[in-house]
Image (spheres, helix red, strand yellow):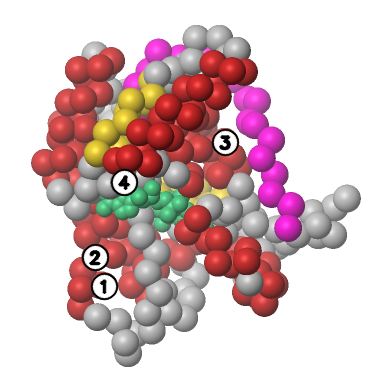
Amino acid sequence: MTEQSNPGRVNRELVTAAYPELPGKVAVITGAARGMGASFAAGLARRGVHVVGGDINAEQMADTAREIQAALAAEGVTAPGRVVAAAIDVTDADQHDQLARRALTEFGRLDFWINNAGIFPFALIEDIAPEQISAVLEVNVSGVLYGAQAAARHMAEGGAIVNMSSVSAVRVRKGRGAYCTSKAAVAHLTESLAVELGDKGIRVNALAPGYIDTEMTRWVREDPIALAHALDSVPLHRIGAPEEVFGPLLFLLSDSARYVTGHAIAVDGGSRHV
Ligand SMILES: NC(=O)c1ccc[n+]([C@@H]2O[C@H](COP(=O)([O-])OP(=O)(O)OC[C@H]3O[C@@H](n4cnc5c(N)ncnc54)[C@H](O)[C@@H]3O)[C@@H](O)[C@H]2O)c1
């Protein structure tokens, strides 16, 4: 069956590319209680990378960490990384510092920082309240900046930061003005961070996903009209899975990308062109 004839299909097959340099390294992931952050935590732990997962929903973060560890043990994965759960509100710079220190205390090193936490509010420009604009800029933009600052202070040379931008950085949608603005800012901030942190041997890149199957976009999948409309703008005619964003993330963290910095990889089925 082709992708076009089965648009509801979500491809959750695991990425099999080998990156032998990754086991034993340590990653911080924000917003790791669910969605892409949880998928990244599970994928990295499967490959022997230790993870400190931080989320504003501390309870769900703890459950997710336990579930990942249990699933890897049940599958008999050899030498998985350990996943540690932490509470963080990414709008608070000090809490990022605490997250970095947690990684160093638990694992003695810090190699990767994934600024993944984000919010996706809907409001038409005429209706959007000042608090909504502040919230989305605080979480999606300041949260990334604070994370990068903490990473830069605590990471050794050779570290890598990955920020979550979006196709929304280049394609606007009604009702998502504040969100799109925030993700464009993340793309730009990624370039600024790359230029400055290159001095410390730290690479900074971004991922720019399109429609990915998570809680954030569940409403699209559940509304056939919205789904059809969304798929109209995806040349590959289906929505993506978190596992399909994980592959490009792995590449960006790996030595294969050691000369790649200040770049955003689109993982959007081509939707940025439509
Ligand atoms: N799902 C998509 O289609 C899509 C597309 C492009 C970009 N993105 C971006 O990817 C990232 C992950 O998205 P997702 O779909 O997995 O979302 P999600 O809503 O499933 O998960 C986001 C996580 O971030 C956490 N979070 C929210 N505010 C926080 C805060 N202040 N401090 C700490 N944690 C906080 C939430 O509790 C949640 O666990 C986001 O930055 C999002 O904007 C998502």
Instruction: State which mark lies toward you, 4 or 2.
Output: 4
> Is-magenta flag for residue 166?
no
Tag 2 residue = 135
| Residue 261 showing in the rendered view | no
Q: Residue furthest top?
A: 79
Start-end of magenta stretch = 8-28
Tag 1 residue = 132
The Cα atoms of the two marked residues, 4 and 3, are separated by 26 Å
The Cα atoms of the two marked residues, 4 and 1, are separated by 19 Å
| Residue 218 showing in the rendered view | yes
In the image, is the residue at mark 4 within 8 Å of ligand 1 by its beta carbon? Answer: yes
45 lies above or below 152: above
> Closer to the N terminus: mark 1 or mark 3?
1
> In the drawing, what numbered circle is on residue 247?
3
Instruction: Tell me which residue sits at (15%, 33%) in the image.
Output: 98
> In the drawing, what numbered circle is on residue 57?
4
The Cα atoms of the two marked residues, 2 and 3, are separated by 30 Å
Tell me which amino acid carries mark 4: Asn
Tell me which amino acid carries mark 1: Gln
> Left or right: 166 with respect to 94?
right
